[in-house]
Amino acid sequence: MPKSFWKNKKVLVTGYEGFLGSWLAKTLVELGSRVVGIDIIKDRPHSVLEGYRKRLVSIKADVSNLSLVRKTVIEHRPSVIFHLAAEAIVGRANIDPVRAFKSNIEGTWNILEASRGMKFIDSIVVASSDKAYGPHRDLPYYEDTTALKGDHPYDVSKSCADLLCNAYFVSFKLPVCVTRCGNIYGPGDNNFSRLMPDLFRSIARNKTFMIRSDGAFTRDYIYVEDVISGYILLGEKMKSKNLAGQSFNLSNEKPLSVISMVKTVYKLAGKKPNYKILNSTCNEIKDQYLCSSKAKRILSWKARYELSKGLNKAMGYYMNRFSR
């Protein structure tokens, strides 16, 4: 990691208590940054931030509150902003789309608007998703040629947020980039409506794992620390390489069907597969995966964790947590 760049750097992380945000805040603290975090939750249990929170400034707030976001930016004057605060669960977005739109769309334009005209800000990295692309027949997704055309509430919220970033770059020259990832997994993910943490917990507790789809859905799976390294590299290089206005996919480029992933994890755990296919999902894209050649070429980034290595690290965490 480029420690000299991040030493004493003022950094704002929205959604710092979430799965990805907590890993990012932890890493930045370790690199010596002066981190300010915004989140609607404080002191989330079972977080990788345990033992690190005293080394950052925590602000309990909702990014849909523009006046508070603007006050935070003006008061703390970050040179780098990582915007990760969002409604991240597809099922919740289906149940309450307005809440998802407020968080993912309004929250994003608040960060962008609060940053507009602030000369002390060098770079803004906005966390998007592969779902921003929506359904496409031709895969993988490419940043510069695949259209953003989400159909369902969560997907649309991400498509809109991405377009807002582009508008603020083109119209106001705001130094903003977008990252898009597939399914991120690893220690500290407490959203058990997601496939991976639910699978690890089921195995640790010797419970039957419920596959909500038909098992044939295809996804990218990437270990959390690989995503963090991509964010760190982009935050560091955006200004020096003049990358503002661009988007970057982060993927290990090895898509798997849900059923293949489930069987792989059971095999690594040394256990006989124990699952039931419910085929109950709705408003989900069937096949999604990303090309990361742009991140490799421009950022010199690549996923360092092979699937088995990442899965074993994640499994060790959940086995220790739920086997006792």
Image (tube, helix red, strand yellow):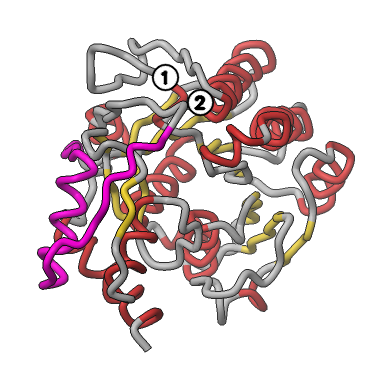
What's the residue type where badge 1 is placed? Gly
* 79 left or right, relative to 286: right
Residue 297 disc label: none
Whole-percent x, y for residue 8 in the image: 60, 63
The crowding category of the residue bearing disc 1, from other C-alpha atoms within 10 Å (few below 14, some 14 to 19, many at least 20), is many
- Count numbered badges in the picture: 2
* Quadrant of the rendered image containing residue 169: top right
- Image quadrant for the N terminus? bottom left
Q: Secondary structure at mark 1?
A: loop
| Residue located at (31% from left, 48% from top) | 211
The residue lying at 31 percent from left, 26 percent from top is 286
Left or right: where does residue 153 sit relative to residue 304? Answer: right
Q: Is residue 224 above or below residue 260?
A: below
Does residue 80 appear in this view?
A: no
Give, as a single range, the part of the protein colored magenta.
Answer: 253-281
Q: Residue at x 19, y 39 (%)?
A: 257
Q: Is residue 30 left or right of residue 37?
A: left
Few, some or many residues within 10 Å of mark 2 (<14, 14–19, 20+) = many
Q: Which residue is mark 2?
A: 155
* Amino acid type, mark 2: Asp
Position of residue 177 measured from the top left corner of the image (x, y, whole percent)? 51, 30
Q: Position of residue 167 (x, y in %)?
A: 63, 14
Residue placed under numbered mark 1 in the picture: 134
Q: Is residue 243 above or below residue 55?
A: above
Query: Height in image: 34 above or below 137?
Result: below
Q: Secondary structure at mark 2?
A: helix
Residue 153 or residue 29, whichever sits in front: 153
Marks 2 & 1, CB-CB < 8 Å contact: yes
Give the residue at x 40% y 37%: 280
Q: Nearer the viewer, residue 37 or 171?
A: 37
Figure quadrant of the C terminus = bottom left
287 and 114: which one is in front? 287
